[in-house]
Image: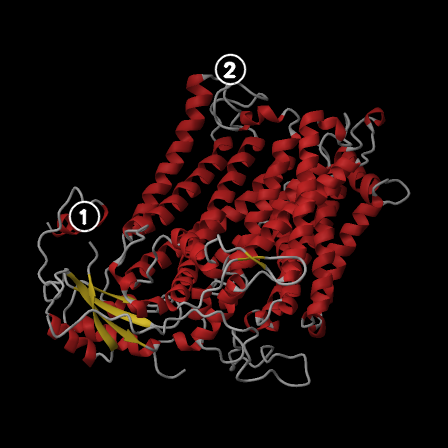
Amino acid sequence: MKMINDFMTAAADYFPMLIGKGSPKFVTSSGKPVYGIVAEFDETPKVFKAAQHVRDAGYTKWDVHSPFPIHDMEEAMGMKSTKLPLMAGGAAIAGVATAAALQWGTSFVLYPTVVQGKPFEAWQPFVPIMFELGILFTAFMCIFGMLALNGLPRWHHPLFTHDRFMRVGNDKFFIVIEATDPDFDPSKVKKVLEDAGGTHISLIEDID
Amino acid sequence: MSDMQPDEKITKQGSGEVSVQPLPRSIPVVPGTTDDGTLIEDPSVRAPLVLGKRTFREVTDIVCGYAEAPIPKIWLTAFTICSMIAALGTGMILYLIITGVGVWGLNNQVDWAWDITNFVFWIGIGHAGTLISAILCLLKQNWRTAVNRSAEAMTIFAVVCAGIFPGIHVGRVWFAWFLAPVPNSNAIWPNFRSPLLWDVFAVSTYATVSLLFWYMGMIPDLATLRDRAAARLHKGVSREFKMPMPIGDGLPLGFMPRPDSIRLFIYGVASLGWRFSSRHWHRYEKAYLMLAGISTPLVLSVHSIVSFDFATSVIPGWHTTIFPPYFVAGAVFGGFAMVLFLLIPLRVILPNFSDLLTLRHLENMAKILLLTGTMVGFAYSMEFFIAWYGANQYEFAVFANNRVNPAEAPYWWAYWTMITCNVIFPQLFWFRKMRQNPLVIWIVALAVTIGMWFERFVIIVTSIHRAFLPGEWHMFFPTWVDILTFVGSCGIFMTLFLLFLKFLPVFALAEVKVVMPQSHTDDHH
């Protein structure tokens, strides 16, 4: 059920004309729905400790934004490991199977030919292409699977409306707690982020 | 909710002003020496990978500065020359297609010569990038972050050059689709038992995976460039569009959008909306690690399969089981030489480049040249030994009479050029003074690049120019079209590399930040 909800929320971002989002829990004074509350941090150790603090406060819909992948952040955020390796394994099998089907199918079924006296039953010459296609499919899954799980490409996001967020690719760190979190309560979230040492705490409006 | 308003647009201190380079170092290099402080031999001291105690912001400014600065005159000059050479090469290809392969110096006996030499040469150069990204990643060699982006770019461009030659050497290029796994008009499919078809799959897989790997690595850095362009537009410090001119200032073109608007659009689209989320980074790193894991056997397989083109034939000099590892070692060797050949001048030309590519990086790569050069030297002696020990007179004759002996072999000079450049030159790196001197490394890298071209020439031409019967003996002489096609491929390579230097992040910004001490999560840095 939770998975379906997550999926529908993500799909609503892409197809707002087809899927309605439901009425927001919080709106700003201008009537726009709230996306979340963001806090800024200056240094890696500070944002790392802050992430542990937010994790221990029990939030689930939140994220840390940093210019580079921070070592052990998965643990500090209490993230589950991704399913990507499993998907890549499936892609590898599909690639090898495709190559096997392509080579046996064309050399035995569609137009059996003997070239240079090499016997039909020899499987060895087919190994290199099976290997290459296995690699190719795995690479496709690694990259496009990674992007799909991340919900990318997505050129339009509420965080991009936040001016200070332009420095996330440079030297600043941000923690965002989203309004879709079941425990989201603006004043409590603000308190948690303040306790965690965040500065420039501000509210982000959702985009239409 | 009324007590909290959305962030007002008054916080205008986003990043992104184009900084004046070179950025001064807060800690100068050891004065009066060529040592930059990274050549420490003390194992208890960790040599810095980024010089001058840089902050994250300074590193961002340095790397993005190359792509954001107005086009320098020297770049414009180099680009003009290289693109003209590339156009010349394209013209040669067109001439070949219109006229036929007779414009090359090929003949009935030597039917593979410079075309396949160039193909193997370029595809070999294209191995260093993936080696640095993949194998050094798995081996946790942090120093690779300084060179991986440019080496990967070089890989792509070398594979582009390599891809040209098999396509055009077939003669009637409009039949090049025979390479693809589709049936021809007689419903016959390509022969999947042929190493030439394996080669098609290996090279095209390699090109695709390298391109994706390179692009994926660039997504966060393109997002940084996007955000900086946006910040400049937002703050109103963005430059007007100026057409770069060879002499004097640029020509202002009022009707063009600002460069930052163009950047914001192109980098914005290309960075796919990356927002540096840790949940994204987690999957990104997993994907990167898996790509490194599969690219390692891939890079080893590609040159092995290229070597099968020769090794599975029955021509003396080609029919050798040592070829796959020998070709792979040679590819790594030639690829690293090309990386050094291109990057060492950049340390002088581009400001602050030597802060990120230190002498220690050069020394490490010089050590790899020494290792792989010695492996290649071992392979040369081993194939000669087996030619003698195997007691096959034709095999031995290829080595003794076609290659080594100046009295018998017309191509002896090619063989000895190869030995001098590939085996003798890298031995200089046994001496610390030599492998710590950028000029010496650059000269050796140039020698190795030349030597590796001759290696492929020696393998291909000297093996087939004299077959079993003296009546079949024939020399190969390149025509002007042969020569200018090769020169043109170098022009294509350099043009693409110059475009990369000017418009894309030259260092893997996010990865460089990971190896800086400030990225540690504890307070003691």
**Can you tell which of label 1 and label 2 is closer to the viewer?**
1
Task: Count the marks.
Answer: 2
- Indicate the quadrant containing the C terminus of chain A: top left, top right, bottom left or bottom right: bottom left
Q: Amino acid at mark 1?
A: Ala
Name the residue furthest front.
B254
Q: Chain of mark 2?
A: B
Could you tell me residue B176's position as x and y percent? 57, 27
- Determine which residue is flagged by label 2: B185
Which is more toward the observer, B154 or B248? B248
Give SS at disc 1: helix
Which is more toward the observer, B93 or A6? B93
Which residue is found at the position 44% from the left and 38% from the top?
Answer: A133
Between the C-alphas of marks 1 and 2, the distance is: 48 Å
Give SS at disc 2: loop
Which is more toward the observer, A122 or B45? B45
Could you tell me residue B283's position as x and y percent? 32, 56
- Determine which residue is flagged by label 1: A12
Q: Residues within 10 Å of mark 1 (few under 14, many from 20)?
A: some
